[in-house]
Amino acid sequence: MKKVLILLILLLVSVGLIVGCAKRPPIGTQKVVETSGSRPDWITVIPTAKKGMMFFRGIKTRAPNLDGGLTDSRMHAARQVAEMVETKANVDYENARLEYGIPRDDKDVGTVIRDGLIMLSEAMIQGVKEKEIYYEKVSEVVPEGVTYFYSCYILMTISEQDYRMIASQVIDRQKAKARAMKNKKAEEFLDKMKERVMQTRFEAEE
């Protein structure tokens, strides 16, 4: 009985030494332990505009939980939509302003347009559609052991048809506001901007 007990103790000690000597991955080592599917190409390369569609990619890395990561990635995509709207709307505004010969600091037109740009960005964010979601759960070796986080990605789209429709609605509301204020100059200017918006095309850059 004593021999069996001694052999058992020796065996446990040997196992402990083997486990203790096993090489531990370096701190910072990461490994993908779960995914939502195959890794799509749009994670690294955002699709170019095509067939009247524009694409936006939202990213959130090192999210402590999946729901929060997806929410943050949507917000990231929404910021890109707002930037796109601001860029396109400002181009239309500048072109129309130059064509009409209206000074940059013209208050009759400027106030109505600034309010309209804010409304347009907010409306356009609501108009984008969720096309695809992808996420990875990642393990990372830390001094205390192993921790986990999520990398979340979302691909969103908006069509030029929806862009024109939403922009047209916002411009019409601003035009009604200008009419109520008897601001004829702003009304005419908004008509010119609407003409330009209705010519919007989403095409790949050369």
Image (cartoon, rainbow, N blue to C red):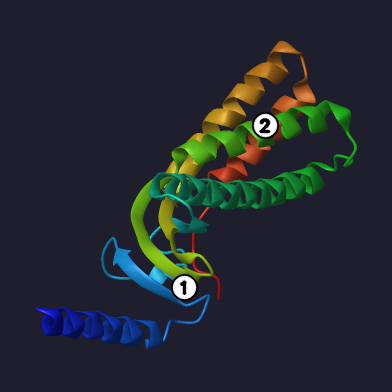
Q: Say which mark, if any, is on residue 44.
A: 1
Crowd around label 2: few <14 · some 14–19 · many ≥20 (10 Å): many
Element type at mark 1: loop
Asked if residue 107 lies left or right of residue 122, the reply is right
Q: Considering depth in this image, is 179 or 116 the residue closer to the camera?
A: 116
Residue at which label 2 appears: 116
**Residue 73's x, y, as percent?**
49, 52
Asked if residue 163 lies left or right of residue 40, the reply is right
Q: Considering depth in this image, is 109 or 153 the residue closer to the camera?
A: 153
Residue type marked 1: Thr
Q: Do we see residue 40 in this rendering?
A: no
Asked if residue 5 lies left or right of residue 146, the reply is left
**Residue 157's x, y, as percent?**
42, 52
The N terminus sits in image quarter: bottom left
Query: Looking at the image, is mark 2 or mark 1 earlier in the sequence?
Result: 1
Q: Is residue 48 above or below residue 72?
A: below
Q: Considering depth in this image, is 13 or 40 the residue closer to the camera?
A: 13
Q: Residue furthest top?
A: 180
Q: Residue furthest left?
A: 1
Residue 104 sits in quarter: top right
Nearer the camera: disc 2 or disc 1: 1
Asked if residue 63 lies left or right of residue 121, the reply is left
Residue located at (87% from left, 29% from top): 107
The C terminus sits in image quarter: bottom right
**Residue 175's x, y, as percent?**
65, 23
Q: Considering depth in this image, is 169 or 141 the residue closer to the camera?
A: 141
